[in-house]
Amino acid sequence: MGNAITAVLLDFALPALVVSAVFLALLKFVMPPAVRTVFKREVRSYFMSPIAYVCVVTFLLVSNGISFWFGGVLERGEADLYMSYFQYLPWFFIVVAPAVGMRLWSEEQRLGTMELMLTMPIAPWQAIVGKYLAASVVLFSMLVLSFPIVLTVNYLGSPDNGVMLAGFVASLLVALSFLSITSLVSAFTRSQIVALLISIGLCLFVWLVGLQPVSDSLLKLFPSMPWISSFVSGLSVLTHFNELSKGILVSRDLIFFLSFIVFCLFGTAVGLRLNRS
């Protein structure tokens, strides 16, 4: 048991602390004061309401329960948890990320506080970044609190913790991508329910277009233009998740996720500008 705890602390707790320290340092010393103000306000609103706690507890119960009961974590004897755990996480985030982010701008529009916020001495992009980072903390907390499954696997055997860490990084990037979609949708509607449902649909779409049957169907529809299938597959979150979650660190996958998030946040700014005009 002691070796398992040591492995988890060194291979997972330490990287999580480093990421948290870097994030706090960037927030304090790099980000403008307006971003910090919005971030603190949003984090406080998440953790002073049941939203964050319900999402975190539901995610942990469902993800760990399905992995143990249906994924066969113990029976498979995997060294990286890909087939029994990580392949399921993005499916959970298709629902959980929109549930966390549906209120980002819809609630502001419904209450009429968005106009007040945007008339303050704060740039729209600062409000967008501050809100997005606050919601990201909730998603990051979910993955950090998933440590019991890592502890269990380390206690029962000698897994490849490096590959498992890559799986968590890939899952976080997928969750942040889905959150950015939700931010974009939320900027165009006053209803949280509408934002939730549309975001789930879009997240599901950008995930499913990477499946092999979709690629095969496109090849059959456009046999003379195979690049269409490759192009659509390359735009899918699934394609890039599969590479990273197996421990294959390729810069193009990281660039894809970063570009995807930036594009959606830019779309959020466009949506807010349209609502103001």
Image (spheres, rainbow, N blue to C red):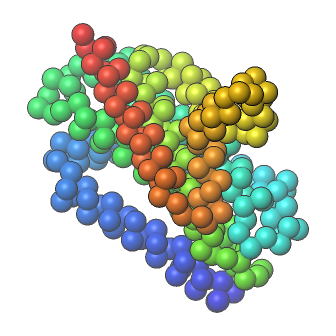
Along the viewing direction, whichever of 138 and 261 lies nearer the viewer? 261
Residue at x 18%, y 59% (from the top left corner): 29
Residue at x 27%, y 19% (from the top left corner): 273
Q: Is residue 84 visible from the viewing direction of this image?
A: yes
Q: Is residue 109 left or right of residue 124?
A: right
Quarter of the image that includes the N terminus: bottom right
Q: Name the outermost residue toward the bottom.
A: 2
Residue 211 position, x and y percent, is 73, 39
Quarter of the image that includes the C terminus: top left
Residue at x 82%, y 56% (from the top left corner): 71
Q: Quadrant of residue 125?
A: top left
Residue at x 78%, y 34% (from the top left corner): 216
Residue 96 position, x and y percent, is 59, 40
Q: Quadrant of residue 112?
A: top left
Residue 18 position, x and y percent, is 39, 71
Residue 114 position, x and y percent, is 28, 22
Along the viewing direction, whichever of 22 and 257 lies nearer the viewer? 257
Q: Name the outermost residue toward the top.
A: 277
Q: Name the outermost residue toward the right.
A: 75
Q: Is residue 134 visible from the viewing direction of this image?
A: no
